[in-house]
Structures are given as structure tokens and as C-alpha cells.
Amino acid sequence: MNVFLPMFFLGLICLIYLGYQDLKTREINITPLLIFSVIGIIYFIFFGIFKGFIWLYILQLIISSIFLLTIYILGRFTTYAYIGEGDLIAIFMISAISGVSVLFAPFVFLMGLLLTLILPIAFFIYNIIKGNYPKRKISDRLLLMFFGFPKDINSITNFYMPLEKYSIKSKKIISVVTIKPNTSTEKQINELKIFAKEHKIKKVWVSPLMPFIITLIISYSIIGALTYFNLLKELGYFAISFV
């Protein structure tokens, strides 16, 4: 019996549930994450003692904790490195339930970051197809086209981050492109809507706040398939069968 698979599938179910919750509310309930982390630790300490991998598992938890603590501290210094506490706890849970694969959780995290790079490419292609070419200098135009799309001001919710900041200078409306991550967009959107209503602005460039846990689910599934199901080996056998 593979003692790692039960916790892998339980973790996947937990992540899918939290991903659904995050899409609806943009908040993660950390209680299931903490519960599953404790269950995983108890489960693998029990099997670790009897199967001889207890110290490797403890090392794994220590490495993951240091890794996540470093990311958390970086997020305190700059919003560009900010990752929500719920996402960090989700990564710790992944480490706690992934048995004796020391780099499993860090690889899931790094692959999740790489997957987010697909979004700017998708935005850019979408804007080209729709003909969304903002009348700005080339650098600002590319930033807007890679990071978002124009949206009617009245349909913008807290699930979006404005990419433009408006102000009045010398009786003229000035728009400045801002790509800086904002962990609380509610106030910014309310101010933007008030300004837009006063000055009859119809559309604003925005970026959807895609939950990071969605990319974690995808990367968790991929790394899990490679780790527990020898996916690359099976694909190799499948390819050879055609030769």
C-alpha cells in the first residue's frame, strides 16, 4: 500500500474546495488548512516512525517553514512580493501532507508562479483580437495590454484591480498607469467610480484578481502526478508503444 496517496487526494479535495471558495468570495478559510496540516503531520509521524522516514519528514517541515517564512517577510517589505497568508498556509499544508518529498511544496509554489505568467500572454492576445489599443506611450500601452483589459466602470467590482489612477492637474484629467499590486482594492475602486461619474469616464483598464490558489491546484496536481504516479515514465512507455 502506498501510504502517501490517501493524504495526496485529501489535500487535493481540500484545495479544490478552497479554490471554489476563493473564486466566490476572494477569501480563504484557513481552518480546513490547519486541520488538514495537523492530520497530515500526525499521519506521517505515525508512518514515519514505523517505516523509517520520520527525520526526513521533520526536515521537510523545517525547510518548508523557513521557505514560507522568508516569503512572508519579503511580503512585509514590498507589495510586489506579497502573497496572502491563506496561500502560504495552503503551501505549508501541501508540505505537511506530501510525505517525504522535501522539495514537493517549494516546487508546487514555483510552478504556480510560472503558471501565472500565462495570464499576461492571454491578456495581450485578447486585447489584440478585441482591438484594445490604449492611446499612450508604447511602454504604458504594453503594460496595460499585458496586465489587463478595459472594462465598463459600472461593472467593476472588488474582484478587479484598477490599472489607472486619475487626477486633475491644471484643469485637465490626468491618467497614470499603475501596476503596483493592491491588497485592498475596495477603497481604490470606490474613489475611481466617484471620479469617473463626475468626469464622465466610461471605461477603465483593470486586471482581474485571479486567486493564486487556483494555480496551486494545477501545479499540485502536476507535481503529484509526476511524484506519485510516475507520469513521465508512463508517458515514455506510451510513446514507445507506437514505435
Image (cartoon, rainbow, N blue to C red):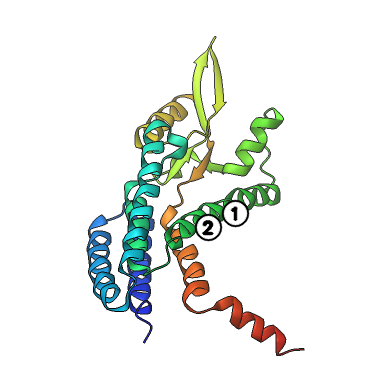
Which part of the image, by quadrant, shows the C terminus? bottom right
**Residue 141 left/right relative to 27:** right
Determine which quarter of the picture holds residue 50.
bottom left
- When the figure is inspected, residue 102 is found, relative to residue 188, above or below; the finding is below
Amino acid type, mark 2: Met
Determine which quarter of the picture holds residue 64.
bottom left
- Of the pair 38 and 207, the residue shown nearer to us: 38
Residue that appears at 39% across and 68% down = 100
- When the figure is inspected, residue 90 is found, relative to residue 225, above or below; the finding is above
Amino acid type, mark 1: Ile
**Residue 24 pos. (x, y %):** 35, 57
- Mark drawn on residue 118: 1
Which part of the image, by quadrant, shows the N terminus? bottom left
**Residue 107 pos. (x, y %):** 49, 59
Residue that appears at 52% across and 57% down = 111
Task: Identify the residue under disc 2.
Answer: 111
